[in-house]
Amino acid sequence: MMKKAFTLATALLCSIMLFAQGVNFQDLTYEEALQKAKAENKWVFVDCYTSWCGPCKMMADKIFPQKEAGDYFNPLFVCVKYDMEKGEGLELAKKFDIQSYPTFVILNSEGVVRQKLMGSSELDEFIERVKKALANMEILDEIEAKYNNGNRDKEFLTQYIGDILNVSTPKAQKAALELYQQLSDEERFSEKYWFLFSNEQLAPIGSKLFNFLVENHEKFVASLGEQKVKAYIYIILDAKLTDILMGRGKEITPELVDQMKKYLEALNFPTIGNNSFLKADIAKIVLTGNQEELLKYCEDLVQKIPGEKFPFIIVYAIKGKITPEQADRWAKVLQTAKDKFTVPQTVINIDQLIQLIKE
């Protein structure tokens, strides 16, 4: 009798502990998660993160462990999380078409992506975002059915692109191109359709829409203003080059970097300094994977530029890819750059960066 009572008490305690926990991210493969969701009649909630993403860590450390998060997510979803730069996450990043981090994907048990949510937020707001995403699924089904049945009205396509963008970037890009082809020149350069060109998901670097934007940027400037147009193009290009220097942006080719440099030259925008062109030259070498060539280039570069102009973020691209001898030479490069600072308030933790490349 006592044993039975003990067993019941233990079970009750376990139930209370389970109920009180935060989001239960389970150690399952993608296929196992789908199977479990089917067996339990649940959705699948996937946290797509990377090790370097600050907002991802905030969600993992502060939001998902809360009891209220567990109370909402655990009854509705089989929750899993994958590093998009490791193991199974590498393929899932392509499968889910992940463009930024964190991204949270909601799938049915058949593996069909029903909604995607980008970015972090506080718990109450995040739960409301998920609730809204679930509620919008029926609306999304209706609007996609209209698109599949041939509706290509400009107003409808505008709505469809906005609704489908967070679910399927390729579908949104296809619809954006269809809308673009219907527009007159006056409409293309108007505020109303600026969203087609000013969204990196719809007009990624190298795409037809992005090329049209750069090739006709003066006409966009005449309609929308220099700061709005040229600043957007510059920010997108510079951010992508920065990604490459940090060891990301692996979808970019050396040929596309050459094209990006031509884009920068065409802009003739005062904000653009030599640093962006410098990033482009270094990015090409990073993409080749030739560590010795990259090191020699930077050994020469650090002698020619002010210390604060040196791209210290390059340490993230070389981390784990260099020999001990190369690490020692990189340490000298970093120290030389710091010794050449001309801006007194510039603060760079050289010791920390050197430790990073020697790990």
Image: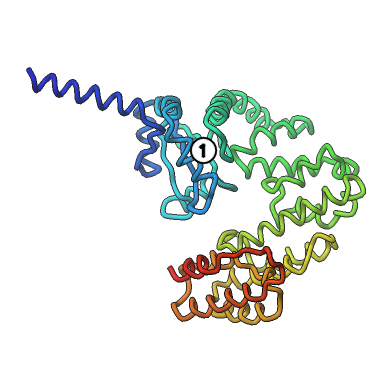
| 87 lies above or below 8 | below
> Where does residue 269 sit, x and y in percent of width and height?
84, 60
Furthest-right residue in view? 222
Q: Nearer the viewer, residue 329 or 225?
A: 329
Write the residue at 85% across / 44% down: 188
Q: Quadrant of residue 202?
A: top right
At a point 44% along the width and 78% down the height, the residue shown is 324
Q: What amino acid does circle 1 point to?
A: Val
Residue matched to label 1: 105
From the viewer's perspective, is residue 323 above or below residue 183? below
What residue is drawn where x is 81% and y is 59%? 271
Q: Quadrant of the N terminus?
A: top left
Vertical relation: 243 (above or below) 126: below
- Which x, y percent locates residue 130? 54, 29
3 with respect to 40 (left or right): left
Residue extending farthest to the top is: 1
Q: Which residue sits at x=30%, y=24%?
A: 16
Residue count near mark 1 (Cα–Cα under 10 Å), binned few <14, some 14–19, many ≥20 = many
Q: Quadrant of the C terminus?
A: bottom left
The quarter of the displayed image where residue 125 is located: top right
Q: In the image, residue 230 lies at what x, y percent?
A: 82, 54
Q: Circle 1 sits in a helix, a strand or a loop, which is it?
A: strand
Give percent across and percent down for residue 78: 40, 33
215 w.r.t. 143: above or below: below
